[in-house]
């Protein structure tokens, strides 16, 4: 006989269901990344969302309280950046698709 304890049912109650409609091809891309990470697609998506949200919090904190020594940034027109730096844009997109461990390894290699 299978028994379900109260803790397991409470843990299940904390999980929320959320429907996402990714653009064509993205589901397969997520499946491949999840396979390489040895995670389920759900775990991969949750991990990436958690990382993205954590990064957003850090960015918001920094923008609200910039260090005195922080250089001042100015906005650059997107069209100018993309027109002159297509290779950089492609490189940035590829970098963003990498797992965090691979990003760190690449940055160490470039230092």
Image (cartoon, grey):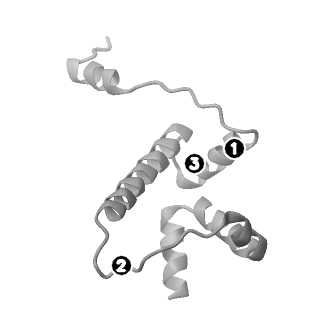
Q: Which mark is on residue 26?
A: 1
Q: Which residue is mark 2?
A: 70
Label 2 and label 3: CA atoms lie apart by 37 Å
Quadrant in which residue 76 is drawn: bottom right
Q: Which residue is mark 3?
A: 34
| 71 with respect to 3 (left or right) | right
Closer to the chain start, of discs 2 and 1, is: 1
Which label sits in the foreground, 2 or 3?
2
Q: Is residue 23 above or below residue 83?
A: above
Q: Is residue 97 above or below residue 39?
A: below
Label 2 and label 1: CA atoms lie apart by 37 Å
Residue 66, given in percent of the width and then of the height, sits at 31, 69
Label 3 and label 1: CA atoms lie apart by 12 Å
Dot 3: within a 10 Å radius of its alpha carbon, few (fewer than 14), some, or many (20 or more) residues?
A: some
Q: Residue at x 46, y 52 (%)?
A: 52
Residue 84, given in percent of the width and then of the height, sits at 76, 76
Residue 77, given in percent of the width and then of the height, sits at 66, 67
Q: Residue at x 73, y 75 (%)?
A: 85
Which label sits in the foreground, 3 or 1?
1
Q: Is residue 106 above or below residue 75?
A: below
Dot 2: within a 10 Å radius of its alpha carbon, few (fewer than 14), some, or many (20 or more) residues?
A: few
| 77 with respect to 71 (left or right) | right
| 29 with respect to 53 (left or right) | right
Q: Residue at x 52, y 43 (%)?
A: 45
Q: Residue at x 50, y 88 (%)?
A: 111
């Amino acid at each position: 006989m299978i028994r379900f304890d109260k803790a397991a049912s409470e843990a299940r109650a904390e999980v929320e269901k959320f429907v996402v409609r990714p653009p064509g091809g993205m589901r397969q891309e997520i499946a491949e990344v999840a396979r390489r990470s040895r995670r389920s697609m759900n775990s991969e998506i949750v991990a990436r969302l958690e990382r993205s949200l954590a990064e957003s919090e850090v960015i918001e904190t920094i923008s609200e309280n910039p260090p005195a020594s922080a250089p001042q940034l100015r906005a650059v027109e997107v069209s100018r950046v993309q027109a002159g730096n297509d290779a950089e844009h492609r490189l940035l997109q590829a970098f963003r698709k990498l797992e965090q461990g691979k990003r760190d390894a690449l940055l160490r290699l470039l230092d």
